[in-house]
Amino acid sequence: MENKWWLIEDEETLHKARISNNYKKKVLLQKKLYIFDQDGTTYLDFKPLPGAREIVAYLMKKSKSYVVFISNNSSKSTYTYQKKLSSILDISISENQIYTSTLATIQYLKLNGINSVYAVGTPDFEKELMNHGIELTEENPELVIVAFDTTLTYEKLKKACLFIRNGIEYVATHPDKVCPTQEGYIPDTGSFIALIETATDVKPKKILGKPNPDLINFLLDKFNLSPSDAIIFGDRLYTDILMGKNSNITTALMLTGESKIKDIERYGIIPDFVFINFEEVLQLLRS
Ligand SMILES: [Mg+2]
């Protein structure tokens, strides 16, 4: 793999540094599918991160390219995300540019021929399942699904656990234990899984969402592309970057969110590129 940083002290090193930037630019421009993480990568606290709006606009204009946004949050619908992103970026983002762990779950249900489920999820989540032809039932479901249910009740947990104790398998939309909010970290799906696992002694059959590569593989299939055609920009090494590595696409760590340079060694997850922010990417593309 090529070096990412060069100490420029002579002509030869300067030449190598130029090659390095040219190489990065070439790789970036060759891609056809640009996958963006949202929080910490594209925006933070409802504000676009430096260069994010410009890079999204730039890539959406690039011919034969797709720009999509992914999220592990299964509590909100695609429509909610489409509205939020369009308003933050001040760019018209369409619903078919948004891919959440809910869609990864729906895809999983379809691939496995599952038509009826018991869902521990928000009304938004339930509606999205129904829109894709999945029946919600409280009697003899084929599967139990655990999502980021911000409307969770004891009754729902009880029902889910009784189904699981009776031998019905369960899958979770994503593994995140907590979700960052302006109030602080709040319990997310990973914490619900821990509770259900404690109560039933059964592990989930599958956990979708990042870092599971299914969603990226689904996107590659959908757009008829190969892994070398895609790049993911994300701020978390152990979710975004790991997901990219799990699906063999190019990975770019953005230092605008959670992961810092020192974490690369700590986690042993090495991104192909590291950028301070999208202004650096834009500068590279325009050089
Ligand atoms: Mg993020």
Image (cartoon, grey):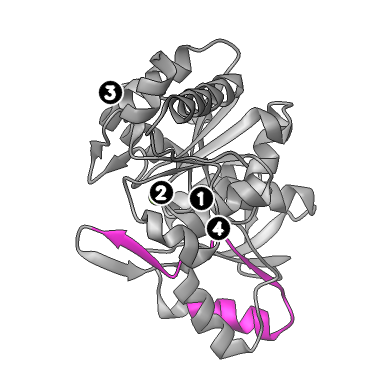
Q: Is residue 129 visible?
A: no
Q: Residues within 10 Å of mark 2 (few under 14, many from 20)?
A: many
Label 4 or label 3, whichever lies nearer to me, is 4
Residue 245: give x, y in percent of width and height. 63, 49
Of callouts 2 and 3, the N-terminal one: 3
Question: Label 2, label 1: how many angstroms apart (C-alpha)?
Answer: 7 Å
Q: In the rendered image, which residue does mark 4 sit on?
A: 269
Residue 189 vs 76, above or below: the answer is below
Q: Residue at x 66, y 44 (%)?
A: 133
| Ligand 1 neighbours mark 2 (CB distance < 8 Å) | yes
**Helix, strand, or loop for circle 2?**
loop
Quadrant in which the C terminus appears: top left
| Ligand 1 neighbours mark 1 (CB distance < 8 Å) | yes
- Amino acid type shown at disc 3: Asp
Query: Is 183 colored magenta in this rendering?
Result: no
Q: Is residue 181 visible?
A: yes
Q: Residue at x 35, y 56 (%)?
A: 258
Q: Residues within 10 Å of mark 3 (few under 14, many from 20)?
A: few
Dots 4 and 1: beta carbons under 8 Å? no
Q: In the rendered image, which residue does mark 2 sit on?
A: 235
